[in-house]
Image (tube, rainbow, N blue to C red):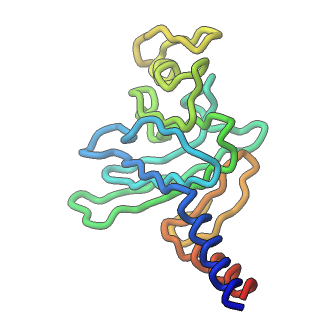
């Protein structure tokens, strides 16, 4: 019996330690920014977006159409607008878990004209489809077949929700870890 308890604790520890929680600040210092602008994430990693100012979204798009919400083959994930009052001391957070780390994910802020001013974010960009090329396209540039760009002039569940499949390589996760802890507790209880 003690072996199973130790094995469950060890297994639980490895599964929690293996996945990372990556925090991205949205609108830091009142800017039209995601900080950092791009991340590399493994399957199982959670990307948490903390909205720091104004009224922004994290809306999934495609590499070719950075400022349009992804609708095919599946509807892209979307945080919805997250308004932050001036002088706020609490900040809304929205997150998703990466299920597929072989495919890049592309995001933008749907508040007009934030995307065309370069407010875009990428997960796992590639050598052929770079974050710089994605951002240039959002700002009115063009992208060559190899992913290089030319510049041009600028022309779900929220906090507390349980993971839900989206069909596009990501799971939406609430702003706290209650669902994860409940699941781990259930697994540990079943093993015991």
Q: Is residue 184 left or right of residue 107?
A: right
Residue at 54% over, 11% down = 148
**So how many labels did they put on this image?**
0
Q: Of all residues shown, which one is farthest toward the left?
A: 87
Q: Is residue 99 left or right of residue 120?
A: right
Q: Is 167 above or below relative to 108?
A: below
Q: Of all residues shown, which one is farthest toward the front?
A: 3
Q: Is residue 191 left or right of residue 182?
A: right
Q: Position of residue 8 (x, y in %)?
A: 66, 78
The quarter of the rendered structure image containing the N terminus is bottom right
Q: Position of residue 94 (x, y in %)?
A: 49, 58
Q: Is 130 above or below relative to 46?
A: above
Q: Position of residue 106 (x, y in %)?
A: 57, 35
Residue at 50% over, 26% down = 131
The quarter of the rendered structure image containing the C terminus is bottom right
Q: Of all residues shown, which one is farthest toward the right?
A: 73
């Amino acid at each position: 019996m003690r072996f199973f308890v130790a094995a469950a604790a060890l297994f639980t520890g490895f599964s929690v330690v293996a996945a990372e929680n990556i925090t991205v600040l949205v609108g830091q210092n009142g800017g039209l920014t995601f900080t950092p602008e791009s991340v590399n994430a493994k399957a199982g990693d959670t990307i948490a977006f903390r909205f720091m100012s104004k009224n922004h979204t994290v809306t999934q798009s495609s590499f070719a159409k950075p400022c349009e919400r992804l609708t095919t083959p599946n509807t892209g994930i979307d945080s919805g607008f997250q308004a932050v009052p001036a002088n706020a001391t609490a900040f809304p957070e929205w997150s998703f878990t990466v299920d597929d780390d072989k495919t890049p994910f592309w995001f933008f802020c749907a508040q007009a004209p934030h995307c065309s001013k370069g407010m875009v974010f990428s997960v796992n960009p590639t050598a052929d489809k770079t974050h710089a090329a994605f951002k240039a396209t959002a700002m009115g540039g063009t992208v060559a077949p190899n992913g290089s760009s030319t510049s041009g002039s600028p022309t779900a569940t929220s906090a507390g929700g349980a993971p839900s499949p989206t069909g596009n390589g990501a799971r939406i996760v609430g702003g706290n870890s209650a669902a994860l802890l409940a699941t781990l507790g259930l697994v540990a209880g079943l093993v015991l």
